[in-house]
Image (cartoon, rainbow, N blue to C red):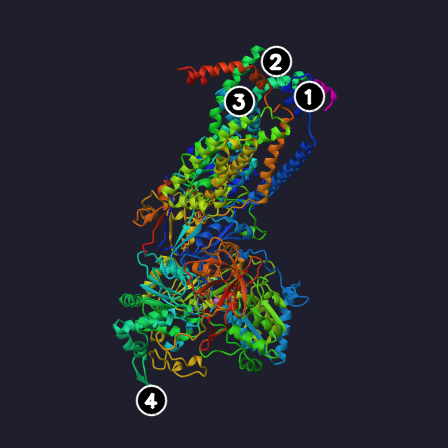
Amino acid sequence: MKSTRREFLWTLGGAATAYGVWQVPDLVGPAPAGDPGWSPLAETRHNSICLICPSRCGISGRVVDERLVRITGNPLHPLSRGGVCPRGIAGLQTLYHPERVTSPLKRVGRRGEGEWQPVSLEDAIGEIAARLQTLRTEARPEALALLAGHCTGTMEDLWRQFLRSFGSPNYVADDYNDGTDSIMEVVHGIARRPSYDLEQAEYVLSFGAPLYEAWWSPLQAFVSLSGNDGDSDRRPHLVQIDTRFSRTAANAHEWLGIRPCTYAVLALGIAYVLIRDELFDTDYVSQHVTGFEDFVDDTGQPTEGYRSLVLRNYRTEEVSAQTGVPVERITSLARSLAASDAPVCVCGSDVMLSRTGLLSGLAVHSLNVILGRVNRPGGVLVGTDPPLQPLTEPVIDSIGRAGINQPPVGDAPPFGSGDQATRFAAAVAEADTSRVDALLVYYANPLASSARRDLWALAFEKIPFVVCFSPFLDETTRQADLVLPDLLPYERWQDAPAPTSYPYPVWGLSTPMVPPHNGGIHTGDAVLALAGHVGGVVAQSLPYESFEALLKMRARGLFAVAKGMVLGDEFARRHHRDMEQRGWWLREHNEFEPFWEDLVQSGGWTDLRYDYTDPQQLSNTPSGRIDLLPAALRGGHGTSESERRLYVDVVPAEGAATEEFPLRLLPYRISTLSSGTLALQRWLVEQPGIFPDVPWVPWVEVSPTTARNLGFHDGSTVWVVSRRDRYKARLKEFPGTAPENVCAPYGLRHPDGGLANPLALLDGSDDPLIGLPSWSSTYVRLERA
Amino acid sequence: MARWGMVIDLERCTGCAACEVACKSENNIPTVPPDEAEMGRGISWMRVLAHVERDFPDTEMDSYPRPCMHCDNPPCTKVCPVRATYINDEGIVGQIYPRCIGCRYCGNACPYTVKYFNWYGPEWSETERLHLNPDVSDRPKGVVEKCTFCHHRLQKAREDVRVEGRELREEDYQPACVEVCGSRAMVFGDLDNPNHRVAELKEDPRSMRLLEDLGTQPKVYYLRRSR
Amino acid sequence: MKSEVAAKLATMDADEQALLRPLVETSRSFYVTAGVLCVVVLWGLFSYYTQVRYGLGRTGLNRPGYWGIYIICFVFFIGISHAGTLISAILRVSQAEWRRSITRSAELITVLVIGFGAIQPIVDLGRPDRVLNVIFHAQPQSPLLWDVVSIGLYFTSCTIYLYVPMLPDLAIIRDSGIKAPRLYKFLAAGYHDTQYNHMILERVIRVLAIVVIPIAVSVHTIIGWIFAMTLRPMWHSTIFGPYFVVGAIYSGIAASLIAMVILRKVYRLENYFRDVHFDYLGQMLLVLACLWFYFTFAEHLTVFYGAEPAEMRTFWSKVTGPYALPFWTMTLGCFIVPMALMSRSATRTPNGTLIAGIAVVIGMWLERYNIVVPTSVNPIWEIETIGRYLPSWVELSIMAGTCAGFVLLYMISTKFVPIVSIWEIKEGRAMVSEVAERVARYSGIGSPIARRVG
Ligand SMILES: Nc1nc2c(c(=O)[nH]1)N[C@H]1C(S)=C(S)[C@@H](COP(=O)(O)OP(=O)(O)OC[C@H]3O[C@@H](n4cnc5c(=O)[nH]c(N)nc54)[C@H](O)[C@@H]3O)O[C@H]1N2
Ligand SMILES: Nc1nc2c(c(=O)[nH]1)N[C@H]1C(S)=C(S)[C@@H](COP(=O)(O)OP(=O)(O)OC[C@H]3O[C@@H](n4cnc5c(=O)[nH]c(N)nc54)[C@H](O)[C@@H]3O)O[C@H]1N2
Ligand code: SF4
Ligand code: SF4
Ligand code: SF4
Ligand code: SF4
Ligand code: SF4
Ligand SMILES: [Mo]
């Protein structure tokens, strides 16, 4: 009896159940959330992946009555293990955003005027095909370019195949590039970003990598560094070195504030102690490493090796003076690193996004090398891609061949691919006549997010035909001639590999959880349809009936290899790994169809065994050894910047604070937000960070002392002004900011949609070796607004 | 009778706020427009609060995810003139929206400031309505709401295990915030059931409760950072 | 004034003439003032309409600043209501002769202001449509229920306490026939000033006066407890009960003084509200100023000495922080001004007490502000954000409407009941010799005064 009464009370609404509100008539209140018409709702769960950031975590969607009502983590996913970040959860708000484009749109009136006419899909694709065919009949296929934003996996392969068979070399990537692939390329001869085996590491020394906030995969960091792998006693010791008191710093076991751009000095200072006290891995170095000792180079020149360079230049006191890190701290870091069985140093984009990015990155990575941490459990590993079945060999005709042999628009840096998008925009903007006649924009919004919006605006003026494949009328899409509304990830088939920071291959599969939005079209299907319309070799190169069919074809590669597993739970993962390590592998599916079904159900495929013995994953250099002093970086590169000597000139010569611009700008990414897309997630913008009083508004952080000296107080509205640009923000006092810096979170907008992009303030300098912009060499001043 | 409670390990919590947003999504918590948010009218049953100390480079910060503490001796329920907030015999402190008169007395009585008031009715656009959780009702304007320990999930779990004819297990009933935490900083269960992890964790030497000296007997425990 | 009424009035004695004149004679400025007040009231009603229509969002309230103007006004108005009944009851019980001319005006304040005070928490409700839940789902453990009960009782007893001593006057009006005969016939309820009736009346009044005192004390005690029953810094205090009662009486006397000065001026009651009244009331004000200071000082000193971090945040926010202005203005109004003016007989004049009264009323409103707001916006847990509260136009309009409504009703009431009790004045004149006798008795040795007074 007692419990029935209690149940009754709960039913009255205390439990927040829907029943309550329907049963108790409510005079003023709104209708209950659900549709009151339903009786038992059709409810399903779908495993999928999140495509919001490079982490590609496993998600699981709760679908009620064909509506996606919750996004949670997929516990089967080996990287994220059931965890998700706030952005992933709020993905719902992009799916059901009130401003989604509901049909293909054609511009009427002038560009950017916002006058659109809905057109049919057929007409839209027909029109693009006609424009593109003209380029081919004029034998100028290279005048087509694609700007590809968040584009990975088969979508990337599809676009590349399309461009290649069409005859264009202009695949322009506008995505996350931290340049660390260049480190691996020059030192190990493997042009692939390093992976970090955080799960098995014991001691993680992060050089400015925002592990918990941005990085490649916050979830990888959450899961590994919290010991969320079933074995909760074992957690790596995290030491965060940072220029500001970041969230990662806050939650690290230790944190170390450092002067901007001096990470490399600290790294080499640590190396100094390791070498001086003989604490490095002498066996490993003698077996696998070259360039450590002094040597005579190919031209017969006696050359100082790593050991001498470090011992000569990085005496602890000098390092301390340069970095601002106390001497004892440097020594103890070195000792702790050496004392740990499985230490690893993570090189963050803080290190790379500077004028001496590559050289600094090499300095950090050299610690992993001399400690013998490459290709060892808990160290730096070299990942592999999931063994997918390749696309058919593209058919290329003579027009196409001529096209792809043209140099791409925008020059490339000596190492890596650099900031392709900005270089492309600059080349188009600065040329008298554009070499680009048609630009396809997929999943990118450079007019809002590029550090050089000005260049992009100029470039757009010069490109006669722009098509955007985007579900939203973002700043760039508003300047398009045609808009094809893409589907959102929860409505579409898509695959994506795990981020390169994760050592094991994972093939994540995004499957449609809800029916596609009215009028939208999967860009993959749109590309296939476009290929069909363009016809000829392009159609022959993409003979797939749908993007889904294409993905299914690719999965045959996974079915064919005798390794890996369809995603499974903790027990299955462990079992599988143990078996594979002992050389066993049991086929679970004899037919492809059930394999595919399982794959779709579980959300992907993975192979959790890493072969530590494969020499190909250690070094692929001509000498067969890890090269600490690669010849490619010993010689000059024509520019004075790159005449810098490896392990010597690691600190950029840069402008100092002036009276006009007294504060150094440090742009950073907040964990809840970042680029344009995420401003669509209202839950996040309402409460973006730790400050309770910055809902919906951009802000900048300065130390309380600086604020006081400038005559501002917490909450003042200020202009952040650099030589190039300025924007308005709210000033927040934050004691974790060094007095000489301004920390500027990016990805925020004003409530009216106005941009507030600190990247637009950057001084425009870059690292000439890898072509990536320098992010913390810009000085600004704050003005009262 | 179960006594539901939570243990939050501050050592593991990264302050990522996934719990915050998961709660909003699970419990249909709308956003409020910018000017309203500025006034402090946003609703966040779970909120990750930060405590920052000392200047660069000695700064330290702790993040405290803060749901309702579901106090065993709740000061909020005592003051309610209509019993629209009450504690049930499993220790969950609930709200009865259709009865609440909106006096906000409970809000002032709660020492943890976890009660939220609906200054206006919830606003969802036509499309946003589609993603609402059908298990949880919208709150009308003028009433107080707060974390319910996702009680609707308990009801659902009860139904499920009844159908399956078995006992309720720890994993059958987990709140939305606990579920998404990538760092597994939060653990939820029956504090009195020795088979549940919370029963042991709450005895950890690092364990503490917020404003413990007030005698409210919160059922949310925190494990201090050892630093 | 119609001539027949004038003729009737002319037949009455001097006290009756002077005190009944306002009932039959209304000046132009009365209408103008009433018109203006009506507009303000309507504006207040409109503001409330928008609040009901759109939600409490139209106020400046927020989290954690959950209570604001409405609760301040609630405490303030109910406080003012201690003017009449309590003072008049105490004076009656102690047989203070000088009370005779001042009780009515004070009691009238009480009855009218309770209503305006009592609606404030309803205005503050998110769901005014569900206010009856307080009865349907009554929760004996909630201080709000105690409050509903005690205010209900208080209102009833004060109304009776106002009405019963008014009967002889109503009978006089009825018998004189100068105004609304049927209304006064009804109101006077068949009272005839026979000796027997008069004896019963006196007895009833004496009982009522005694009953009303504990009820009045309970009302503001419970209001104090509403705050004190929470764990909030600077609310959770044992002295809140008596502190609130003293504050209430203090603001009540101040309000009565203001009313008296104005009545005296506009109705030319110099003969009834004499300097001595202001002198005596001024002395009471002085005593209460000291009491108020004593409580306020004790309250803040204990908080300061205990130095609990949460309490200190609230404390400093009042003393030097964002609430320093209201805090020190309060101190000025509640202590410094009344002390300066009321401690010298030269300034215990009508004008002096008017200034002091206004200072105290403003000061006491601010006192409630300083109790409600700083604590409400300062959560106990230091990590929670400290809120800010700025009332919106809706709240200010409703407050203005409430004040205007009260003044308007009071004004109108003076047109229906003599604002000074006619029969008591007359009785007082008749009793001069009896009083002299009584006074003579006090001076006797071993007189049983202590027992007799009750
Ligand atoms: N203000 C600001 N500027 C930035 C950054 C920032 O965080 N803030 N970040 C910088 C960095 S690191 C990068 S990588 C770049 C990234 O910049 P962009 O590549 O421009 O990335 P976003 O703005 O996130 O997304 C681009 C657009 O994709 C659209 N979109 C969203 N979902 C989908 C979808 O499912 N399909 C398709 N086709 N389109 C979709 C949205 O309309 C969005 O505007 O920006 C850089 N500049
Ligand atoms: N939360 C979240 N995570 C993401 C994404 C997201 O959208 N949201 N997107 C992904 C994408 S697209 C990207 S590009 C990455 C970005 O990931 P990261 O680039 O690793 O993260 P940011 O915080 O943007 O990095 C900026 C940091 O670099 C420092 N810094 C700036 N300039 C310099 C410099 O010149 N030299 C040195 N040494 N340091 C400097 C700043 O202080 C700041 O801490 O995050 C990925 N992960
Ligand atoms: S980390 Fe990236 S991929 Fe993972 S849930 Fe968050 S946004 Fe999605
Ligand atoms: S989800 Fe977990 S790690 Fe993130 S803030 Fe919440 S408790 Fe902390
Ligand atoms: S935390 Fe607050 S709302 Fe929750 S039970 Fe305790 S007093 Fe009540
Ligand atoms: S706001 Fe509602 S739940 Fe809170 S005390 Fe008032 S009636 Fe009770
Ligand atoms: S238990 Fe449920 S209601 Fe409470 S904070 Fe967590 S998700 Fe929100
Ligand atoms: Mo990026």
The three-letter amino acid code for the residue at tag 3 is Trp
Lateral position of residue A14 relative to residue A305, left or right? right
Q: Is mark 2 within 8 Å of ligand 6?
A: no
Q: What span is colored magenta in the figure?
A: C1-8
Give the CA separation, mark 1 to mark 4: 127 Å
The three-letter amino acid code for the residue at tag 1 is Lys
Q: Kindly identify which residue carries mark 2.
A: C192
Residue A92 shows in the view: yes
Q: Position of residue C275 (x, y in %)?
A: 55, 27
Q: Kindly identify which residue carries mark 3.
A: C98
Q: Residue A308 occupies which quadrant of the picture?
A: bottom left
Q: Kindly identify which residue carries mark 1.
A: C179
Give the CA separation, mark 4 to mark 2: 134 Å
Which of A260 and C452 lies nearest the eye of the viewer? C452
Q: Nearer the viewer, mark 4 or mark 2?
A: 2
Q: Kindly identify which residue carries mark 4.
A: A300
Q: Is mark 4 within 8 Å of ligand 2?
A: no
Q: Are marks 4 and 2 in contact (CB under 8 Å)?
A: no
In magenta segment, residue C94: no
Which of C93 and C428 lies nearest the eye of the viewer? C428
